């Protein structure tokens, strides 16, 4: 038995070393604590009737998971006196009490590793020792050293996996009966099968279980620090820009308030008229170069100016609308300018030396094509 126990310890330590590279969050002293309550049956392993000597048992367990693989538990277990065992004449309701300190090994995490959350079904091997007491009555009670081994089938339930349903088969030995040295004897043992529920208290990491911690190497840390510094610089620049924009808004608001509160000003604008360049427009009918009587006032305006200003001259430019050929329009434009010139000479007695007449062909001064059938007279000093 000693060799088997040594071999199991070696295997556990090797597996723990292999999983040492996994770092978890939630490993404080007050983390990963659970409490469980179970009930079931217990019966002697040998030399007794298996079922007729079976009696009920209750169990209370307080456990601390040290790593995802290893844990410790303190349990108290008592049997109820419902049968009369050969050689045992207990007269009390509780005929046996065991208090054990148990080591726990999560076989799933030992073999396959911890992935950050408990599996639905976990197999946990338990082994430990403690104090046993038989209640016989009449001063015949006796104490002994007990040892227990078992395999717990734990079903993790719920999204947070805070609750477990437990199935716990186990064997418990009286290893110092009759003042013997520690000895595991099947004749001094009992088999038990319990079923119960366990609640895992919330940890400092915010969950009810271990979490995988993400580790960074120094290069990653330096890169993240550089990124943080860049973000801080950008934030400072944005804050400065915001402060400048707010100052501009205040300045504009002040200027607006000043404008609103300012008394209105009367601005006098003096326009200086100039007669150096005056124009008069004479219109013509389509295809015609004869000045109509309705246009005489425009010609007379030109003559009056020339008579009142002895040094003035006039340039008359004739235009045509785009209808017809370019050759005809050129002649028609020239004839319109000459018609105005002839009227100024013959009717108003203006010297021909003061008049210049030019044909400009098709005009494009006005948006409407037929408005360009004109002769425009420009007067100058």
Image: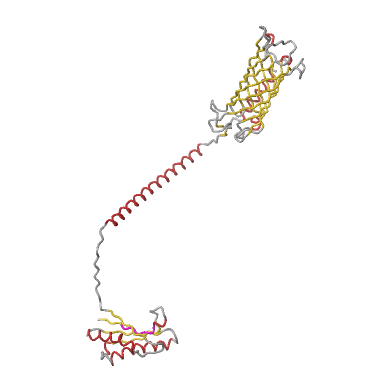
In the foreground, 306 or 82 = 82
Quarter where residue 147 is shown: top right
Q: Quadrant of the C terminus?
A: bottom left
Residue 133 placement (x, y as % from top left): 65, 13
Q: Position of residue 141 (x, y in %)?
A: 66, 9
In the foreground, 329 or 190: 190
Q: Quadrant of residue 349?
A: bottom left
Q: Residue at x 25, y 72 (%)?
A: 271
* 248 in magenta: no
Relative depth, front residue between 317 and 7: 317
Outermost residue, bottom side: 346
Towards the viewer: 212 or 37: 37
- Membership of 373 in magenta stretch: yes
Q: Is residue 217 left or right of residue 235?
A: right
- If the image is split into quadrants, where does the N terminus sit? top right
Farthest top residue?
139
Horizontal side of 312 relative to 185 (left or right) equals left
Which coloring applies here?
Answer: secondary structure
Can you give x and y, in whole percent of width and height, for residue 194 in the image? 69, 24
Q: Main secondary structure of the magenta part?
A: strand
Would you say 113 lies left or right of 349 here?
right
Decide if residue 228 is on the left or right side of residue 172. left
Residue that appears at 69% across and 9% down: 178
Figure disc tally: 0
- 281, above or below 259, in the image: below
> Which quadrant of the structure image shows residue 169?
top right
Name the spot of residue 29 as percent of width and height, x first: 54, 25
Which stretch did the figure color magenta? 372-377
């Amino acid at each position: 038995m000693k060799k088997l126990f040594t071999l199991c310890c070696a295997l556990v330590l090797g597996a723990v070393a292999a999983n040492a590279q996994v770092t978890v969050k939630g490993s404080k002293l007050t983390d990963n604590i659970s409490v469980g309550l179970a009930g079931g049956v217990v019966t002697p392993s040998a030399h007794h009737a298996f079922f007729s000597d079976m009696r009920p048992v209750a169990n209370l367990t307080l456990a601390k998971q040290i790593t995802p693989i290893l844990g410790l538990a303190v349990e108290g277990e008592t049997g109820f006196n419902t049968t009369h065992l050969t050689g045992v004449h207990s007269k009390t309701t509780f005929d046996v009490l065991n208090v054990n300190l148990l080591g726990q090994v999560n076989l799933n995490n030992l073999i396959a590793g911890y992935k950050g959350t408990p599996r639905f079904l976990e197999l946990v091997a338990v082994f430990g020792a403690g104090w046993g007491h038989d209640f016989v009555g009449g001063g015949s009670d006796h104490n002994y050293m007990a040892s227990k081994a078992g395999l717990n089938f734990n079903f993790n339930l719920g999204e947070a996996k805070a609750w477990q349903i437990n199935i716990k088969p186990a064997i418990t030995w009286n290893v110092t009966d009759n003042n013997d040295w520690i000895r595991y004897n099947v004749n001094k043992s009992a088999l038990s099968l319990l079923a119960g529920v366990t609640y895992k208290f919330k940890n400092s990491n915010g969950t009810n279980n271990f979490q995988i911690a993400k580790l960074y190497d120094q290069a990653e840390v330096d890169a993240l620090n550089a990124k943080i510094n860049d973000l801080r610089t950008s934030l400072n620049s944005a804050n400065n820009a915001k402060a400048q924009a707010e100052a501009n808004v205040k300045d504009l608001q002040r200027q607006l308030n000043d404008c609103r509160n300012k008394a209105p000003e009367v601005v006098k604008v003096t326009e200086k008229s100039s007669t150096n360049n005056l124009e008069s427009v004479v219109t013509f009918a389509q295809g015609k170069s004869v000045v109509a009587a309705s246009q005489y006032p425009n010609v007379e305006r030109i003559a009056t100016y020339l008579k009142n200003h002895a040094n003035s001259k006039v340039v008359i430019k004739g235009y045509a609308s785009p209808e017809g050929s370019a050759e005809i329009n050129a002649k028609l434009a020239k004839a319109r300018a000459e018609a105005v010139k002839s009227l100024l000479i013959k009717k108003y007695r203006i010297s021909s030396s003061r008049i210049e007449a030019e044909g400009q062909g098709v005009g494009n001064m006005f948006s409407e094509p037929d408005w360009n059938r004109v002769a425009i007279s420009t007067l100058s000093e």
